[in-house]
Image (cartoon, rainbow, N blue to C red):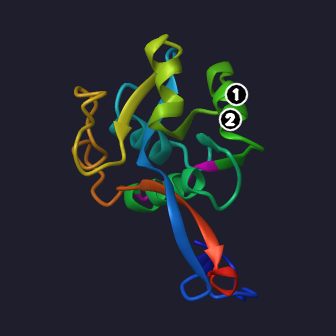
Amino acid sequence: MNQALFKKLSFDPINDLVPILLIERGPLILMVRSESPFKTVKDVAAAAKAAPGKLSYGSGGVGGTHHLSGALFEHVAAIDMIHVPYKSGGAAATDLMGGQVDMMFEQMYAAMPSIKSGRLRPLAITSKARSPLFPDLPTMGEAGFNGVEVLKRWARPVSTASRC
């Protein structure tokens, strides 16, 4: 992502780094607090179209998968929302539960406890297919927003200069 976010890098992420261990790979879930009036992704998009720049989404920082998932959703849905970056996904989720932000995209495993406890309501998942962990949760494509497919991947890279 750095190549798309920064004009100049001091390294070439394609040729100078090599992944050595896949640590994480999984979809994100678009979720709202349980008291939210939004029951579907289309509800969110309709509200955002009716009041551009009013709805907000939290993320664990600028330029990460969660932030860019929200930006992708804005682009595909042709809506305008406010991005509220936090220092961590946990801080964003806390403010989501408290009503300070309207929604967020979160990794499935991190979202599960709050969803299962009923504190947050999932609206859709960013994978191509439904998850066996949430079989009733539609994909963003099924919800009417084709192209909002995101799998967070995080690999531990090593510099090619230090490889043996």
In this orientation, does residue 36 appear? no
Q: Secondary structure at mark 1?
A: helix
Q: Which residue is mark 1?
A: 95
Question: From which residue to which does the magenta span run?
Answer: 78-82
Return the mark for residue 92: 2
Left or right relative to 14: residue 86: right
Direction top: furthest residue: 117
Whether 92 is among the magenta residues is: no
User: Mark 2 belongs to which amino acid?
Assistant: Ala
Judge whether 20 appears above or below 33 on screen: below
- Tell me which secondary structure the magenta stretch mostly adopts: loop
Q: Quadrant of residue 135?
A: top left
Residue found 27% across the figure and 36% down from its top: 131
Q: Secondary structure at mark 2?
A: helix
Residue 140 place in picture, x, y as percent: 31, 46
Judge whether 108 appears above or below 72 on screen: above
